[in-house]
Amino acid sequence: MERRKIIIDTDPGQDDAAAIMLAFGSPDELEVLGLCAVAGNVPLSFTSRNLRIVCELCGRSDTKVYEGALKPLNRPQVTAEHVHGRTGLDGAELPEPTMAAQAQNAIDFIIETLRREPAGTVTLCTLGPLTNIATAFARAPDIAGRAKELVMMGGGFFEGGNITPAAEFNIYVDPDAAKAVFASGIPIVMMPLDVTHQLLTTKARVAKIAAIGTRPAQVLVEWLAFFERFDIEKYGSDGGPLHDPSVIAYLLKPELFSGRDCNVEIETGSELTVGMTVVDWWRVSGRQPNAKVMRHVDADGFFDLLTERVARL
């Protein structure tokens, strides 16, 4: 498999941390060019901190962390401390990071990297609101055509929303940014709630991660125990959905997922459905597809992959 260059744009979040750990555990397949922080689950000061904590936990303090947007493009900030805790990584006791964020802004880093690297070689992996990406595309419209693709966790259709009845959190936080990215022409692979709600952190699956016995695995188990409590109460399931690692798993084993090419539009006007990803699954609109929307996943295969790669850290 050809080693793929990626930029991870994210707002950690325990499930974001799991996604980054999956990427760090896969150095033969993935070259992480940089980690970009955006405001989302918690404010930017925490998302930057959390990225650096994950880097140090995994022995990857050589990875550069960049700080991006402080708030959505046009709307008040919305956060999710009720899910992720005050810091975004509640659940495990870890020292404050010693590594510093880069002086360069994340948006400038994204623009510079996509212009420097050969066209079609860099994949954008987005695990949070799309504010950084939309801002970069607005400042440098040429870069959307230089990226290989954008693989994102966000949206939902058959499963509805998780922050409002219609909207998934990452899209709801900055629907204007999402609308701009979906209209940019960049190839998009979308991991909606329809897929991630199949990826439940059941007791048996978490026990396999715990059995690894390393410090990164132990911390991940503690993070999952905190993170899943909200969804277990909400959904009444054995474990909560593990959203963001689906993005990285797709890069490593796309055969775990199935879906179809669809047109996806982002609702920005309606009070009732703002942030909704309107997926033309049945192709009734006549609009051209602009995203590959995933619908099904081999959940056991996904957790086997995650466990194997976390064991490498």
Image (cartoon, rainbow, N blue to C red):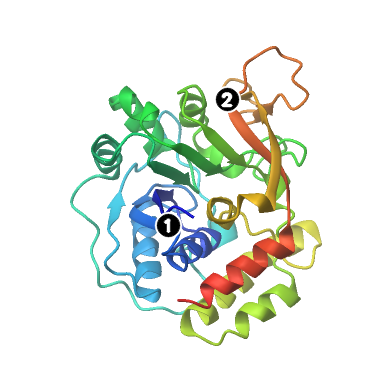
Image coordinates of residue 153 in percent, x first then y, are: 57, 45
Image coordinates of residue 44 in percent, x first then y, are: 36, 51
Mark 1: secondary structure: strand
Residue 169, image quadrant = top right
- How many marks are shown on the rendered structure? 2
Q: Is residue 37 left or right of residue 25?
A: left
Residue at the disc numbered 2: 290
Residue 272, image quadrant = top right
Of the residues shown, which amino acid type is indicated by label 2?
Answer: Asn
Of the residues shown, which amino acid type is indicated by label 1?
Answer: Leu
Residue ID at (68%, 53%): 256
Compared with 290, 259 (above or below) is below
Task: In this rendered view, identify the residue nearer to me: 110 or 6.
Answer: 6
Residue ID at (63%, 73%): 225
Do labels 1 and 2 touch, CB within 8 Å? no
State which tag comes first along the sequence, 1 or 2.
1
Residue ID at (72%, 14%): 285
Compared with 124, 303 (above or below) is below
Q: Residue furthest top?
A: 286
Closer mark to the observer between disc 1 and disc 2: 1
Determine crowd level at label 2: few under 14, some 14-19, many 20+ residues with C-alpha closer than 10 A: some
Residue at the disc numbered 1: 30
Task: In this rendered view, identify the residue nearer to me: 85 or 207.
Answer: 207
Q: Is residue 91 visible?
A: no
